[in-house]
Image (cartoon, helix red, strand yellow):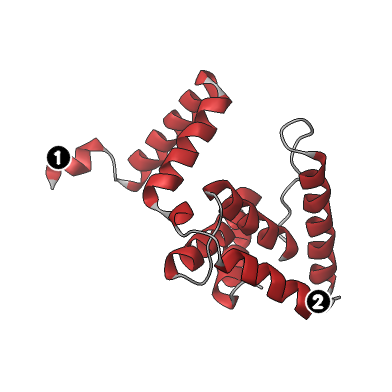
Amino acid sequence: MPERETIERAQEDAREGKSPNTQAGEFVREEMDHIREGKHGASSTKQAIAIGLSKARRAGVSLPTPVEGKVTEKTRKQASRDSAKGAKVKSGVVSKTSAKRSRATSAALKKERHAAASHAAISKQARSSAKKRGAAARHRSAVKAAATRAKSGRGQSSRRAA
């Protein structure tokens, strides 16, 4: 179950009109923090991100299910189950999680390594993910980031002034 602060931050993002991806980012951040704190581990950075996205869907963030062909059918089905559970949570219907299953999941994750949440691992994952998107998509993203930095005053000009 996600922490109350994480849910509140995601709800604040939703109120501000931010995208579901941004809202889900709060849950991924929480997951990375848990791994760094030593609460549990993850076999890879990809798994840590997947756990965060699953938590987001179950908390009611309206993330779309992954596109066919990009992920396995099993992952798509799990994502749609998570989304369905999130819709139930939004309507106020809460089903109790199996204690035995929850303990088994926690025990398995505790045995995993903690390097999955290191800055180097996250950076490597982001780069490999960006490479798959193609040059045009990367360029659009870079232009958007530059515009955001310029708007918030964190661009090159503010660095020179400091």
Task: Tell me if 128 is positioned left or right of 108 in this view.
Answer: left
Task: Tell me if 16 is positioned left or right of 127 in this view.
Answer: right
- For the residues labelled 2 and 1, say whether their Cβ atoms are less than 8 Å apart: no
Q: Nearer the viewer, mark 2 or mark 1?
A: 2
Give x and y (percent) for residue 52: 61, 58
The image quadrant of residue 92 is: bottom right
Viewer-proximal residue, 23 or 16?
Answer: 23
Q: Pointer 2: what residue?
A: 98
Q: Residues within 10 Å of mark 1 (few under 14, many from 20)?
A: few
Residue 18 appearing in the image: no
Residue 62 appearing in the image: yes
The image quadrant of residue 15 is: bottom right
Whole-angstrom CA distance, mark 2 to mark 1, is 56 Å
Q: Secondary structure at mark 1?
A: helix
Give x and y (percent) for residue 30: 52, 65
Q: Pointer 1: what residue?
A: 160
The image quadrant of residue 58 is: bottom right
Number of numbered discs: 2
Task: Tell me if 78 is positioned left or right of 59 in this view.
Answer: right
Residue occupying image coordinates x 21% and y 43% = 158
N-term-proximal mark, 2 vs 1: 2
Above or below: residue 51 compared with residue 127:
below
Q: Amino acid at mark 1?
A: Arg
